[in-house]
Amino acid sequence: MIKSIGTYLLDHVSSMNIFDIIDIILVSVIFYYLFKFVSDRRAGKLVVGILFIVVAMFLSDVLNMRTLNFILENLVQVGIIGLVIVFQAELRSFLEKMGGSSILNLNKRNSGDMQKIMGCINNVVEACVAFSEEKTGALLVFERSTKLGDVIRTGTVIDSEPTAFLIKNIFYNKAPLHDGALIIRDNRLYSAGCFLPLSQNQDIIKDLGTRHRAAIGMSENSDSIVVVVSEETGMISIAVNGVLTMDYTEQTLRNDLVKYLIGDEASPKNINASNT
């Protein structure tokens, strides 16, 4: 028995060509991102129910339970349409990220780009540390591969060089644009006073206010990096892919922004060069 199974597998492996290998790789990638999509979102709660229906449909077919099988087959057909409608926002976000930099980023940054990014990061960190000490609320969004044109249009375009002084002025509590979010595009302070989508995740702790829910919602709907400073506690947080990480210090904030915005290209040599 074991020998026959081994022979069967060996025959199939030996008959594989390059297209079979590509087919396996593509299916593996699709299943990986589907698993990640389900596990990162509230869709994960439906997996058990879906698996139960699939198993019940299989058993009803094997046991020749025609009425039950008919009901389950029609339920699945209607359920697929229902899932697409209910999770349209999550599916849109998933498809946008499938075409984003996480998969298709083949461009390498030169040293000039690295210095611009580090300069922007340093100014953001300086401003956020000041906000934290003064307990000034702030919401800053780093645009990445997912373009935020719809969000940008809700605010006022300023398209300015990233300076800590200007960031502090934008979020000054008597400034007209301080209540919205600041969108950073191509290392420039691009648009201020923008409205972000609020997260609908029911598992978010109730203590979080609108600013933090907006940060999580923006990161759920795009691959952007969102920095938020609490007006009540002065705590600095970062939202990425729908996950909020809290209680940043100046150094940890800089380190994580470098990790998210530059990644493996952030060698000590490049970072030191940008600070000189």
Image (cartoon, rainbow, N blue to C red):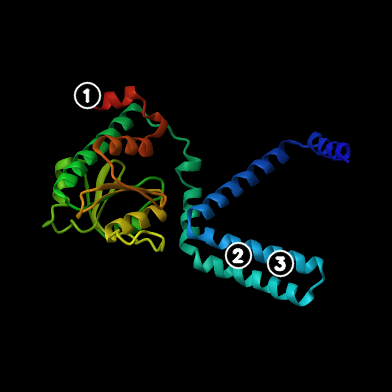
Residue in front for this viewpoint, 76 or 159: 76
Badge nearest the viewer, 2 or 1 = 2
The residue located at (27%, 34%) in the rendering is 251
Q: What separation in Å lies between label 1 and label 3 (alpha carbons)?
A: 66 Å
Left or right: 13 as drawn, with respect to 111:
right
Of the two numbered discs 1 and 3 on the same chain, state the one appearing first in sequence. 3
Badge nearest the viewer, 1 or 3 = 3
Left or right: 272 as drawn, with respect to 129:
right
Q: Which mark is residue 56?
A: 3
Quadrant occupied by the C terminus: top left
- Residue 66 placement (x, y as % from top left): 79, 75
- Residue 135 placement (x, y as % from top left): 16, 50
- Residue 219 placement (x, y as % from top left): 38, 52
Say which amino acid is labelled 2: Gly
Of the two numbered discs 2 and 3 on the same chain, state the one appearing first in sequence. 2
Q: Which residue is mark 2?
A: 49
Give the class, few, some or many, for how many residues have Cα within 10 Å of label 3's Cα (few <14, many ≥20).
some
